[in-house]
């Protein structure tokens, strides 16, 4: 059975989401069935619309609690019957409630060579630590902060004297190439 339906969860800019949508459309190896965001104004929504991918916006309502928010996300996602939940800059931690609804099918990309520099500002943390090389990691998601089993990593060197902005820009470009490649391999392995 083909298992190639992807739902993307993203909170912000969406360059990884766009790269995955473009890869799916061009290669026809996957179908991005929807893009879900918890942020109404996230740029990823515009990117999805341009690619004719359905969008879902489920903001976290003040004080509603994680379970209530996750239940809404699960319910909406189930309509699209995704085989995979692909996080691309989704800024919320997921609980066992959500992860249990999509067991072993939730994937994330993190901009460091995990287990180094987990957390929100991995590029900044690696840069300030003056590392010689960094990279990005595609991993399964568990309830921890960037702690799930590692699927694949790619490395790149820091350039002497480059700014944090340049380092981030280069890193993001690498992420945008790497994420679809890894997803393609995961889908291939599950055929
Ligand atoms: C990326 O650096 C990703 O690794 C991290 O959040 C950032 C999202 O960027 N989880 P974008 O929204 O895909 O452009």
Image (spheres, rainbow, N blue to C red):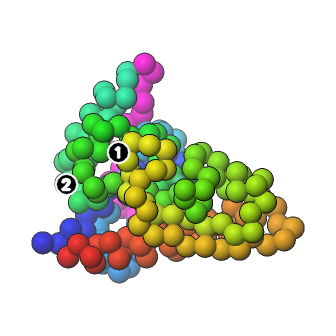
Q: Which of 187 and 7 is in front in this view?
A: 187
Residue 136: image quadrant is bottom right
Whether 190 is among the magenta residues is no
Locate residue 65, reporting x and y percent: 37, 23
Q: Does 138 sit above or below residue 10?
A: below
Residue 72: image quadrant is top left
Rendered-image quadrant of the N terminus: bottom left
Distance between the Cα atoms at labels 2 and 1? 14 Å
User: Seen in the image, is 179 located left or right of residue 6?
Assistant: right
Locate residue 116, reporting x and y percent: 60, 56
Rendered-image quadrant of the C terminus: bottom left
Instruction: Indicate which disc residue 56 carries.
Output: 1
Q: Name the residue under label 2.
A: 81
Q: Quadrant of ligand 1?
A: bottom right
Point 28% across, 78% down: residue: 188
Range of the magenta residues? 45-63
């Amino acid at each position: 059975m083909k298992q190639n339906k992807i739902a993307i969860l993203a909170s912000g800019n969406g360059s990884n989401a766009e790269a995955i949508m473009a890869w799916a459309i061009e290669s026809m190896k996957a179908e991005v069935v929807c893009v879900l965001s918890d942020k109404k104004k996230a740029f990823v929504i515009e990117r999805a619309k341009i690619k004719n991918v359905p969008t879902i916006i489920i903001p976290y309502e003040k004080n509603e609690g994680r379970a209530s928010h996750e239940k809404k996300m699960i319910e909406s996602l189930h309509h699209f019957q995704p085989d995979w939940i692909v996080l691309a800059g989704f800024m919320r931690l997921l609980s066992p409630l959500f992860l249990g609804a999509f067991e072993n099918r939730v994937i994330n990309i993190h901009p460091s060579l995990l287990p180094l520099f987990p957390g929100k500002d991995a590029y900044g943390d690696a840069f300030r630590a003056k590392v010689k090389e960094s990279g990005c990691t595609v991993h399964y998601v568990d309830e921890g902060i960037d702690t799930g089993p590692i699927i694949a990593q790619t490395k790149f060197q820091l350039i002497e004297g480059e700014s944090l902005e340049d380092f981030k820009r280069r890193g993001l470009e690498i992420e945008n190439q790497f994420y679809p490649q890894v997803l393609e391999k995961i889908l291939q392995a599950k055929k």
